[in-house]
Amino acid sequence: MKLVIADDHAVVRTGFSMILNYQEDMEVVATAADGIEAYQMVAKHEPDVLIMDLSMPPGESGLIATGKISDDFKNTKILILTMFDDEEYLFYVLRSGAKGYILKNAPDEELINAVRTIHRGNMYIDSKVTSSLVNELVNPKQDGVHHSDPFKILSQRELEILPLIAKGFGNKEIAEKLFVSVKTIEAHKARIMDKLDLKSRPELVEYAMKKKLLDF
């Protein structure tokens, strides 16, 4: 299988490339240092699996890139690589289209197993994440009842926009990043504020900090 590794640390890209290239059924065809480059490498090589670091400043974050790549390249499975073991990050990245979620401190064997698992079409979740939430994500309730935390009912686009607003980007800058109109961003921002019951930008920033969204 063909692999692309996206991480902003060169030593991580090199180390993981060595581990995965050692496997007879794997070949790392490209690496990337941020989300924008990850998108470009996926477009160029059409890999079977993309291993994506969630946090890659100062370029486009892995989270935003995950949503774009998932939408545009259906045949590429995305395995999120992260330091965060918070359950809410699992919900966040799977909503973005990722098929797997593994912590950076996982053993090499677990990384290899995760890659093979999602390549086969199955979902892979790091064992440190509770099975109860995984079950909820894979088999959501059909009774129409929303999650108690409004954060979990934001749309995919709203999940992309929220951290950008909190980081101080203006509507025009966000619109350019996401290739949509300023009016679209304004509408999404209003819906975010309404869903989260926030009244001001400082409240939104405080909320984003509480959810650790500024780490993306």
Image: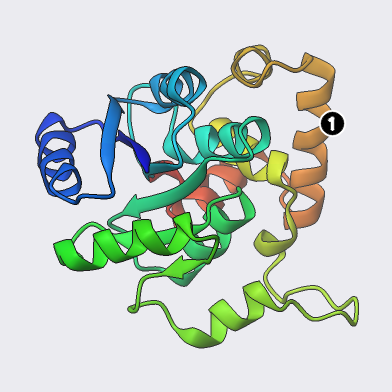
The residue beneath circle 1 is: 187
Question: Is 178 or 32 nearer to us in this picture?
Answer: 32
Q: Residue 173, located in which quarter of the rendered image?
A: top right
Place of residue 16 in the rendered image (x, y in percent of width and height, measured from the top left):
17, 44
Q: Vertically, is 208 above or below 167?
A: below
Q: Which residue type does callout 1 highlight?
A: Ala
Q: Which residue is drawn at 43% across and 33% down?
A: 61
x%, y% of residue 151?
66, 60
- Give x and y (percent) for residue 193: 75, 46
Color scheme of the displayed model: rainbow
In the picture, measured across the screen, residue 166 lies left or right of residue 197, that is: left
Q: Identify which residue is drawn at 43% across, 37% down.
A: 62
Q: Is residue 211 visible?
A: no
**Residue at the bottom extreme of this rendering:** 132
> Which residue lies at the image location 51% right of the left edge and 20% below the top edge?
43
Residue 73 at x, y = what percent?
A: 61, 33
Q: Which corner quadrant of the image does residue 161 belong to?
A: top right
For the N terminus, which image quadrant?
top left
Residue 107 vs residue 112: left or right? left
**Above or below, 204 relative to 141:** above
Residue 41 in sight from this viewpoint = yes
Where's the C terminus, which quadrant? top left
